Amino acid sequence: MKNKKLFVRMRRRHFVVLTAAFFGCSILTYSVLSKEDASMALVALCFVALAVLCVVWFYSAARRLNDFNEPGWKTAYLFIPLFNLFWLVVLLTTDGTIGKNQYGEDPRHRLPFYIED
């Protein structure tokens, strides 16, 4: 049985914000490491922040996959070079399932439209 609090859906907008924060922190860490006079405390703080944000980002990617009714294990595709760029574009651009899917209610509260015959 799935824990409803862990396996919920995530909207595209929230994922874009987390992705921007992740890449911003990555750039900040790189810029700190490129300086010769960077303090070890600052370097350690950047690595800790990047590690925490990396875990949160992969968890969010799994939740984003759940939004369009795909299993979270497919985040493993992000570790395959070149294919990860394609998969990131899919995560950032694909619209979620309208209405309820196996991972929960639609976070945008849209209802499916059915035409009765």
Image (cartoon, rainbow, N blue to C red):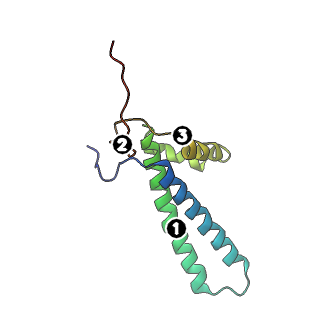
Pointer 1 or 3: first along the chain: 1
Mark 1 lies on residue: 51
Q: Which mark is residue 109?
A: 2
Do tag 1 and tag 3 residues touch (Cβ < 8 Å)?
Answer: no
Q: Earlier in the sequence, mark 2 or mark 3?
A: 3
> Would you say 81 lies left or right of 4 here?
right
Q: Nearer the viewer, mark 1 or mark 2?
A: 2
Q: Amino acid at mark 3?
A: Thr
Task: Choose between 69 and 17: the one closer to the eye.
Answer: 17
Placement of the N terminus among the 4 image quadrants? top left
Crowding at mark 2 (Cα within 10 Å: few <14, some 14-19, many 20+): few
Q: Is residue 37 above or below residue 59?
A: below
- Left-right relation of 65 to 19: left
Query: Residue 117 at what x, y percent from top left?
Result: 33, 12
Name the residue beneath numbered marker 3: 94
* Disc 3 secondary structure class: loop
**Which residue is painted at 38% across and 38% down in the image?**
110
- In the rendered image of this protein, does residue 89 appear above or below residue 114? below
State which mark lies toward you, 1 or 3.
3
- Dot placed on the residue nearer the N-terminal end, 1 or 2: 1
